[in-house]
Amino acid sequence: MKKDNYKIILVAFLVLTLVGCDDNLTISPEQAITTDMAIKTPSNIQKILNNAYGDARSSALYGGGIALASELLANDGDLYWDGTYVQPSQYDEKAILTDNSFVESMWLRAYKISNQTNVVLDNLAVFTNAADKDVAKGEAKFLRGLVYFDLVRLFGKPYVAGTANNQLGVPIILEPILDPAKITYPSRNTVDEVYKQVLADLKDAYTLLPATNGVYATKYSVAALLARVYLQQGDYVNARNMANIVITDSGSVLANSYSKVFNNSENSTEDLFAWQVSSQDASSNDYNVFWAGSDFGGRSGNPDISIENQHWDIYDDSNDQRSKFFYEADNWCTTKWKNQYGNIPFLRLAEMHLIRAESNFREGTSIGLSPLDDINLLRERATASLFNSVDLATILMERKRELSFEGFALFDAKRLKQNIGSLAYNANNLVLPIPLRERDVNKNLVQNDGY
Amino acid sequence: MRIKFKYFLSIVIVFIMQLTFAQESRFSGKVTDRSGLPIPGANIIVKGSNITTQTDLDGNFTVNTKKGQILIVSFVGMKTLEIAASAGMSVKLEDNSNQLDTVFVVGYGTQSKKKLTDNIARVTAKDMENVPVANFQNAMVGKLAGVQITQINGKVEGGVKMRVRGVSSISSSQEPLYVIDGMPLINDNESGSSAPINPLISLNPNDIESVEILKDASSAAIYGARGTNGVVLITTKQGKSGNTKIAINTSAGWSEATHKMKWLNAAQYIELYTEASANRYGANDLWLTEPGGVFDGYSNGKDWRTGQVDTDWQDLALIKGSVQDHTFSISGGDSKTVFFLSGAYNKTEGIVRGNSMDRYSYRGNLDHKVSDKLRVGLNTSLSKTKIIRIGSDNSFTTPLQAVAQTPLAPAYLDDGVTPNNKTTLYYNFLMQQYNGSWDANIFRTLMNSYAEYKIIPELSFRTELGYDNNNQTEEYFAGSLTESASTNGYADANAIQSDKYSINNYFNYNKTFKEDYKLDLVVGMSFEESSRKRQYVAGTGFASDDLQTVESAAEITAGSSSRTKYNFLSYFGRATFSILDKYLIKGSLRYDGSSRFGAANRYGVFPAASVGWIMSQEDFLKDSNFINLLKLRGSFGVTGNAGIGNFASLGLFNGSSYNKQSAINPYQLVNQDLKWEKTNQVDAGLDFAFLNNRISGEIDYYVKKTNDLLLNEPLPGTSGWSSLTRNVGSLTNKGFEFVLNTTNIKTDKLTWKSSLNLATLDNKVTNLPGGDIVSGQNIVRVGETISSFYLVEYAGVDPANGDALFYKNTLNNDGSLDKSTTKNYSDAQRVISGNPYPTLMTGLTNTVLFNNFDFSFTFQGEWGASMYNEAGKFQSSNARYKDNQTTDQMNRWQKPGDITNVPQARWGRSNGDQASTRYLEKTDFVRLRNLSFGYTLPKTMIQKLGVDRIRLYMTGVNLLTFTNYKGYDPESSYDNNGDSNIQKGIAFYSAPSAKTIIIGLNIDL
């Protein structure tokens, strides 16, 4: 009798201990890899970089978010906001609240890109192929330069050429953070410091990147962006020179009709850089969401941003393709963002002609082409009548005809010191607030005036 | 083999003994209740044999046995009695209402209420039966002290929040651990949308015998790492030996919204918006009212000027619902085997248009004594639940968002059938049901088998194997007329397979030394593994609206599959010792390991100890006629919370893509130091019973301090990260709980009992090294209740110009707040302005039995909480947008001197619609939670039918609500942040609860 009991106890004990094996507690995730693995190989570093492109293309930033803020903040009647989202409505009203979630995600996403590029730059040592290494380094610097350029344009008072520009910009973070111990609580750098960083990154990228690189950033994507940065700074000599390099060396040509510039699933011949959109990620194309009619994927405002009568005044020729690049839903929509799945042109050759024309004009030079010829190239492509002469006003008006709704409005107004309605170009409420959540976490961040 | 032989031998011996010694004769007797009324159908078992019989309608029985043989007499609701066989026995059974003898399930064992040193709340089948709610949690509302149960909102499948003694965690799970018949249940919301599905919706409430809720650490610590939020132990029904019983319950009824809000009608809408436009553009701008203007656009050919159109969108969204519940069960058994079988069907048509549920469920429980030493059992349950779903609160397709539509837009086109989606302000939700579908099917299998072997009389070993499978598929289709028109339709399918198996092995040693010293020991281990798989695919472009599955999609636009797993390995022990039945001591220890934590902190130790002193057993009280029980209890224990992501301690990159090329995305920052969140809880209590147990109750005070909070701490975005799960900070819940049960009247004909429970809750964050955490309108701040509202304070309207005003609340030099007002919102500072959790909760249940009538009702009340209406900025915003407004907006400021709280209407301009206390309201309420009235047909009438019982009843839920809250329902909140633990107490087009009335019939055969 007793013997049996011990047997049972023994068996039970075995069951207890056998099942209780510590190995069972080690389980690895199947949908993710650890940080160590992620930064170990060149191919993984490239994939981190590819993800940074994806983050940049997200709706918060270059997938529509920045352009939405720029166009609506600069809107003085060309556009009508008919959407139900509060965040863009605050842009349009020039009364942004610090908890505006569009602003918040712009900030978070931009710094996420900054961190990923820092991770790439910090782990270049894993590359064995020097060319691959240069491309990764160059692309990382392109993306980092790009997001800081837009951060400082959105969250800081305008850069004014010839001044110290020590107004507050945004914090510059150049150290990668993959370990919580390294997290910092930075203060804001000045606008001047941020621009210097942007230029340093972009100049590096320019020397590192090749002339062709698939749909990713090339030497000429960087040059085009540099031209844009110099123009924003009022550095017309450099802006002109960079634009000229792009036009003469990149091999890009203007598309033969204005309609071929947009709604493409493959980059057009004049794209120096375009954000790639496919049916897999179309839902986060905020250009389409807010600017297209609801039959084409836009929201219920049909469209949320409609084009008002005031806008038609900028066209001087009814044959100009650009004056007809609209379609009617409940109200008028721009055709630029009609295709849900179309790539988003970001740096295109037409902009380079406009930069070169404006800079040549301001500098009294004719590097590449005369301002008149550059402008007429664009007019000819759009089947508009050609000009016999140009002045600064006609160049700038041509710029507007060419680039409307692409996100230039606010930044051009600030650069050109133009009023928006009754608001001065440097008004407090034309600068985005430092997001509330960010200041709740980091007490070192000073809020912009007016918030 | 030898065991079997012994068993065989013993049977033979018993048999021979019976043959040799038994002097069989017939004994008869009568079974009555205390008042002498006969009890028909009582069971009589000859102890140690399989001879059973039952009393007849007059309570008489006869049994063949020998004189002096012990008979066991039992009847449902009565105390079981043992009596020696003799001629002409008269057996009087006592009511089992004396709760002291109740046996509580305590986790790996049971314990009599009398000797309990824990705080455990309990509801039984009787308290829950026939309440027409689809999930068992809702049936317990108002019946448990210190347990807040809230269904998120009025959707049928809606998630349920259960908070046991407050909220003990900021970022990890706040839900209790659910255990059914010893097996931890899968309780993960698997909804394909952000609106949660209650994972326990697939359990049939009628299968539940009792629910015990382990509230204090002394009881919950045996579940160690998952005990902090309380443990809910569900015990399912089991058969009783004796005649086979058949029970049928069938009921049906109707439901509607507990409350509707008041919205502008067409005339008011025209008035307010015309005025708002005039205030912005001047009265001469007729863009709204001119022919072909905006109003003409809305009304789609109808003439709004002559009142041809006035759509009440709320009435289209909130409709009359219905419920049906049919349950059938068979139970019974003999002295060796008992069984319980049930089948049930529940159909609930929600009060929100297009939302319904069908549930088919089956349960089979079986328990068999192989021998005196070995017992085995198997509990199984299968169910299929089909839910027809509607959008989350934050979607245009959800019916309740239709209240934002203008009353000038007709709901349907002229044909009266096709929803008008052309001229409505927003997408017309009716189109989703007209041209789309959204079904969820949940298949749930539960299985629990066990074997218990008595090694020696004092020592037994029990092994349990549990299996839980939750299999859910959701299919969604939106046709060519819906929001997905641009892609010619959209469909997706989302399938999830979760399963969990668990093994428990434990010894139980039970020994009485020298009569007065009783020891109960439990030692064992458990292992549990949970895994989850998901497959998802979505496509667009459908040739026809009749082809609704992804197979017919022209293009597959998204797809994914994933797998994940976690497990727990635990060892536990518990010793309960009582001396002279007066001094009680208990100690327990649990050692838990989980794959969720970093290798360095994988294991946690969770001890608990408690003592009790039954004063009423002392000589100076023993003979008191007044005091039946007086017991002092005290306990201390440590519990944990492991409710975080499966791999929260690792630094991780997950897969993503750009340009159709693979990418890896940094998605989680490493934290190897991550460990259990630990809660120390102290509880002091007093149990009492007076006046022949007619007054009894419990008083408890507890302090629950949680340290090392698992917190998704917000990080500066400049780091590239937005949050990190860390063990930081601590918080405290304190409360007082009071339970009072009284038998007010007890006569032969009339019984009236009351049960009152009351609980206070004081929640404070005591330490937060990183400083305030603000999320939306809620804040976590030291010294304040978790998730307190943090808002700018609304100061009303400037009588001079109709501007909305806010209190500045900036700090003065002397530290006080500047209470002057400003119209500039940015100049006003946010302040703590309320909390989302009630500080006082109470429930009162009364039961009256009079002759054949029974009547009971439960009132439930909560005080101290507030709710923020996130949709206020659209609903009550002075006609800023075109959204329809609440009728109180008609009290707007119109001319200088007007005194009102509603600012001037300004089209397209902000005037008081910013987040402020304007949209915050107290939710104090008292509600008649249940009311039930029944009539049992007299036995004399039903005898001829061969039926034991026929009862007709009527039951209502939420029949009355007393509250000043103006929103839909004080208990309904936003279902789109179901997972955000910080954002609480937010309403956003959240559907009200249902008010339900049913009539039903119980038949026992």
Image (cartoon, coloured by chain):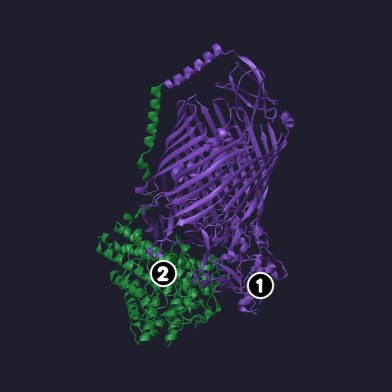
**Quarter of the image containing the N terminus of chain B?**
top left
Q: Evaluate whether label 1 is on the same chain as label 2.
A: no
In the image, residue B334 sits, relative to residue B411, either above or below, namely above
Chain bearing tag 1 is B
> Mark 1, mark 2: which one is toward the viewer?
1
Q: Residues within 10 Å of mark 2 (few under 14, many from 20)?
A: many
Q: Amino acid at mark 1?
A: Ile
The residue that label 2 is drawn on is: A445
Numbered label attached to residue B276: none
Callout 2 secondary element: loop
Q: Which chain is green?
A: A
For the residues marked 1 and 2, what is the alpha-carbon distance in whole angstroms?
Answer: 41 Å
Measuring from the top left, give residue B532's x and y in whole percent.
45, 46
Looking at this rendering, what residue extends furthest in the top direction? B20
**Residue pointed to by mark 1:** B899
- Whether residue B294 appears in this view of the structure is yes
Nearer to us in this view, B732 or A307: B732
Name the amino acid type tagged 2.
Leu
Q: Quadrant of residue A190?
A: bottom left
Q: Secondary structure at mark 1?
A: loop
Q: Which chain is purple?
A: B
Residue found at x 44% / y 43%: B224
Of B55 and B197, nearer the camera is B55
